[in-house]
Amino acid sequence: MKTRSWSFALGGSWAHVGVVLLATACWLVGTNRMSAQSADDVEAAFLFNFSKFVEWPAKAFADGQAPVTIGFVGKTSLANVFEQNAKGKNAKGRELLVKRLDAGAGAESCQIVFIGDASQVAAVLGAVKGKPVLTVGEGDAFLSAGGMIALSRDGSRLVFDINAGAIKASDLKSDPKIEKAARSVKPG
């Protein structure tokens, strides 16, 4: 596994990390609550940025105007914050649409699924296996289970790790900028 510390990533690739951080800051400014950022605000900003730095094949959308659909399994508070902050924003010219899911059912119709309920990880990953759906969850175990991007805390910072093999197996392409901003990238 290729591993980079966050401080190294900041010092070694300002241009790449700067793009991700600038986009995150713009998202947070749009919340009108930058001084009172909640964990959900920061996670929502990361999810928004993932939608801008991942490329889906045309078959992932019903047509050229279809929205980027972000499904949430568990963590209703994050879904609410994302939905509120996504109003008027887009990802690569596509509107953002939030779907609340109970489990794996319906996950295959999303472009991104955030799995905030650890008991549903296997069901959701099974439902979207081999489909162009970016899966995001929490903690190291999420990547080991086959998830694509895992959010975690490193002290007071939110960081993320990438499972490049899982992304590639689902016919998705991640922008090299996001891989440079990741704490670690599990090769594939």
Image (cartoon, rainbow, N blue to C red):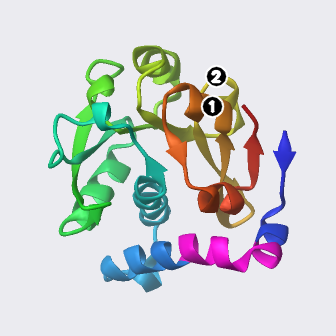
Residue 22: percent from the left, percent from the top? 51, 79
Identify the amino acid type marked 2.
Answer: Ala
Label 1 element class: helix
Q: Local crowd at mark 2 within 10 Å, few (<14), some, or many (≥20)?
A: few
- Nearest the viewer among 116 and 146 is 146
Q: Is residue 171 above or below residue 176?
A: above
| Rendering quarter of residue 188 | top right
Residue 42: percent from the left, percent from the top? 48, 65
Q: Name the residue under label 2.
A: 145
Q: Give the range drawn in magenta.
A: 10-21
Left or right relative to 92: residue 186: right
Residue at 32 percent across and 76 percent down: it is 31
- The reply to whether the magenta stretch includes residue 50 is no
Please give the count of numbered marks on the rendered protein: 2
Label 2 element class: loop
Q: Distance between the residues labelled 1 and 2?
A: 5 Å
Q: Quadrant of the N terminus?
A: top right
Residue 43: percent from the left, percent from the top? 48, 58
Q: Is residue 6 above or below residue 76?
A: below
Left or right relative to 33: residue 20: right
